Image (spheres, helix red, strand yellow):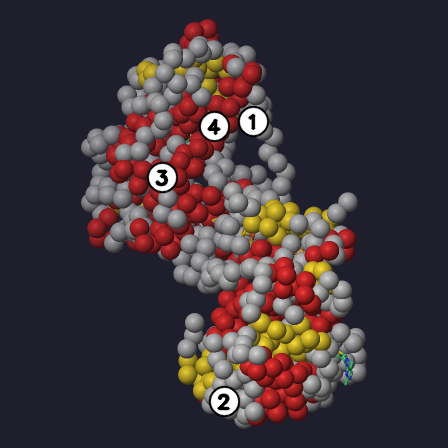
Amino acid sequence: MDDMQRSTLWTDALSENRLTGTWRNETPDYRNLPSPCLGACPVSGRIADWIGKVEKKDYRGAWETLVDNNPFPAIAGRICHHPCETACNRAQLDETVSICALERFVGDTALSEGWAFPAPPANAPAQSVAIIGSGPAGLSAAYQLRRAGVGVTIYESQDQLGGLMRYGIPAYRLEKSILDGEIARIIDMGVTVKLNTEITGAAGLQELRVRHDAVYLATGASRPKPLPGVDYDQPWVQDSADFLAATNAGQDCTLGAHVLVIGGGSAAMDVARTARRLGRKVTVLALEPEAMLPAQRAEVIEATEEGIEFVTGAMMQSAEPGTDGLRIRCTRVDFKRGTTRGAFNITPVEDSEFTLTADAIIPSIGQDADLSRWQDLLAGDGPVLKADASWHTGLDGVFTGGDVASMDRFVTQAIGMGKEAARSILVYIAPDVGAADAPADDPEAGFSVINTAYHPLAERNKPQNADVTARLGNFKEVQQSLDQSQAMTEASRCFSCGTCTYCDNCYFYCPDMAITKLDGGGYEIKSDYCKGCGLCVAECPTGAIRMQEDL
Amino acid sequence: MNMEMINYKDDGQFCSGHVACAGCAEALALRVIMNAVGQDAIGVVAPSCSAVILGGHPMSSVKIPFIHGTLESAAASASGVKRALVAQGKPDTTVLCLAGDGGTYDIGLQSLSSAAERNEDILYVCFDNEGYMNTGGQKSSSTPLNATTGSTPTGKSTRKKNLIEILAAHRIPYIATTSPSHLNDMAAKIKKAKTIRGTKVIIVLIPCLPGWGVADNAAVKTARLAVESGVFPLFEVEGGLTYTMTKATKTQPINDYLSLQKRYRHLNDEQIAQIQQDVDEDWQRLTTRAIEADV
Ligand SMILES: Cc1cc2nc3c(=O)[nH]c(=O)nc-3n(C[C@H](O)[C@H](O)[C@H](O)COP(=O)(O)OP(=O)(O)OC[C@H]3O[C@@H](n4cnc5c(N)ncnc54)[C@H](O)[C@@H]3O)c2cc1C
Ligand SMILES: Cc1ncc(C[n+]2csc(CCOP(=O)(O)OP(=O)(O)O)c2C)c(N)n1
Ligand code: SF4
Ligand code: SF4
Ligand code: SF4
Ligand SMILES: [Mg+2]
């Protein structure tokens, strides 16, 4: 007896004749939604996607997804300030996913496997773009433009590429071979490079504008903010940018045995820890009280571990050479943060003077963009160049981004800005390319749409630091990478927020068999039968399906 | 993601178009059970929500024949069907008997007890929604302490009857509990029961949406919390003596479980503490009996 005969023997019909879909006033809607990490990521890297690929051991696929938005995963995986981890939904269950360490894992795998970017179209490019400055902003734009088949020439005043990634960030946080590897991959796409070529001012810019179809100006911010009252001509004063550029280039440090670093930000930490690695005794003097230091907490902790002393909530008043070194007169201050970023108020505390001794001082209180050289052509907007939402400066065909055009001074911010500008430049030089799709204003897949019953508590695989004793006296990387098994278990901690993993939960939890699995993957709601209960949505582990009111 | 995938096979043995409430966990359980039982089976169903879901004449939501029996005698009817099948030379055909808690703990208890005592070869599934629900929500002896129903508007004053201990006393080969939050467990237990000769009873917890005051999308969540808080432990009893926990840990206090349900809305702290204490003691008693065998 076949199925049908058997059933027709004892019943007239199956219930499928009754269309319970008429009961419904809401319908489930499959839609991948942006994860909070993606919303926070300065390069808008599709994090849930590539982590999902890592979990499936598809490292190549993960890398390809990553480099769609960011050609520097091994760099970002080391030094990104990782706002994604702060936004990560998993932090509300146990601990954030180690997104940054996973990115490093994928980036390092790509470098060790020697994966290259696809060669751009073979025919000679019809158009070319000049890029001034080879920091992360310039290189990111170069990469995106070259991928699109546009000719790119980079003009760089230094003798090597990389900007502050090379001359600012010390090797113990970003190994030079990693930097070289990820930059070489971009240049290998057929980028023309002019080193030791400083574009000195408005005339130079005009000339480039004539020679190329568009110009991207990404000269960064490398002019040290001077510390008032300090005579930079004294041999015992060296500015932080010069100090880091010299030490990063492997030059000897000529400063005395005890160095006072002035400033409490990330750059000051880099200076202090570099000097420490060069065998100096190091003291950091900062206006902020310890808890309010602008450097990242981990940097302060690591610096302290390395034997760096902190004098916080205090200000230098004068420095004079004495018989054994400098006598540095200081006073305690009452520090109040202002309302805008970086703004503050200080009041010296009466009768709180004290004296420090040292052999040299390195002011490290930030850097400004040099706008003066462009001022005849380009308008400023406070401390940065003026640009519209498409990164156009207002001077026809000249675009900008990175530190020179923004106070969001991080490597991945610069990479993101470079990518956006490249898109605008493409539209400018080849309008048929079309503007980027307007971002869908889909709601974020927040913690409330994650069904945590499917995500058992699991300890985070944190990247480990090298032992303190192994760190001093050399520039080996402090932060260690995750090994393959750690990377796999870490990837499996990701909720995959807003991204369907084809787990079939929605299909199996429907009491009305109203979901069909499609042959090519994916699912479809049978509107004849769906009663609109929302169980499929409630039991989705990732928030990739939601109820929409029937209109 | 680190989750267990649902892996039973849906062969279409339970059909769309049934009239269960939107989001009903009993329909969800029927989907698993009918597909796990398969085509070579005959059913008996007592008056209950499942009788309604299976469908009155002329439509059926299942592809095996079902006899709609009486509330008192489902197990007796099932015994008769099985004996007839054996007489016809079809001893391998499964006889599936479905009843609610009213039809099992109360009104059908004596016929179930008799069938169990005779060790009739039936697979008896009790959908335990802790009340007479298709008739509008009256209490049964399965309704838990303090839960409100239409007939216990201020909360039931006595505990839920421990049916498993009653059944275990019959020393039948297989008794198990399962929950619509654990579909793999449910399919596995039905399949296992099918291979055993004699009386098998499986009790499925069914959070009743209108009866318990649970949101349309929350039956599975409620059932899951019942399991995780130990209110409804998942276990098996073989031969009436061998207890095996199939989920060996209790990870949640009862508060979240209770707060999803309107029937517990009136509880004061003292009553909640009482329920927690009962759950803890029952859990302790059960687990000391059980050989831990977490799957
Ligand atoms: C010490 C230090 C540590 C830092 N650490 C971190 C970190 O850990 N993580 C992080 O995210 N960010 C960090 N930053 C910030 C980060 O480095 C910058 O935000 C980022 O490099 C800016 O990129 P950019 O491309 O705009 O500019 P830059 O990296 O500054 O590159 C600009 C390039 O333009 C070239 N150039 C300038 N003028 C001309 C000209 N006229 N002609 C030709 N070439 C020119 C420069 O030589 C340079 O190569 C750090 C910064 C410093 C100073
Ligand atoms: C002897 C008898 N009394 C009363 C009824 C009416 N009746 C039909 S179903 C039902 C409720 C059954 O409750 P339960 O077994 O728990 O099933 P549920 O409706 O909760 O699924 C009642 C009281 C009946 N059919 N037979
Ligand atoms: S759990 Fe994964 S997808 Fe969700 S926010 Fe964190 S990293 Fe992103
Ligand atoms: S579980 Fe089924 S009936 Fe309920 S909303 Fe989803 S598709 Fe519709
Ligand atoms: S339940 Fe699973 S298959 Fe369904 S939408 Fe969510 S992730 Fe995708
Ligand atoms: Mg009932």
Q: Are marks 3 and 4 in contact (CB under 8 Å)?
A: no
Inspect the image, locate mark 2, and give the three-letter code of the amino acid beneath it. Gly
The chain containing the residue under callout 4 comes to A
Q: Are marks 1 and 3 on the same chain?
A: yes
In the picture shown, does residue A230 fall above or below A480? above
Which mark is drawn over residue A60? 3
What is the spatial separation of the Cα atoms under label 3 and label 2, in whole angstroms?
56 Å
Q: Foreground: B54 or A189?
A: B54
User: Eyeballing the image, is B212 above or below A7?
Assistant: below
How many C-alpha atoms fall within 10 Å of the one at disc 1: few (<14), some, or many (≥20)? few
The C terminus of chain A - image quarter: top right
Q: Position of residue A477 (x, y in %)?
A: 27, 44
Which residue in the protein does label 2 denote?
Answer: B240
| Of the pair B170 and A448, the residue shown nearer to us | B170
Q: Amino acid at mark 1?
A: Ala
Q: CA distance from mark 4 to mark 1?
A: 11 Å
**Disc 3 and disc 4 on one polypeptide chain:** yes
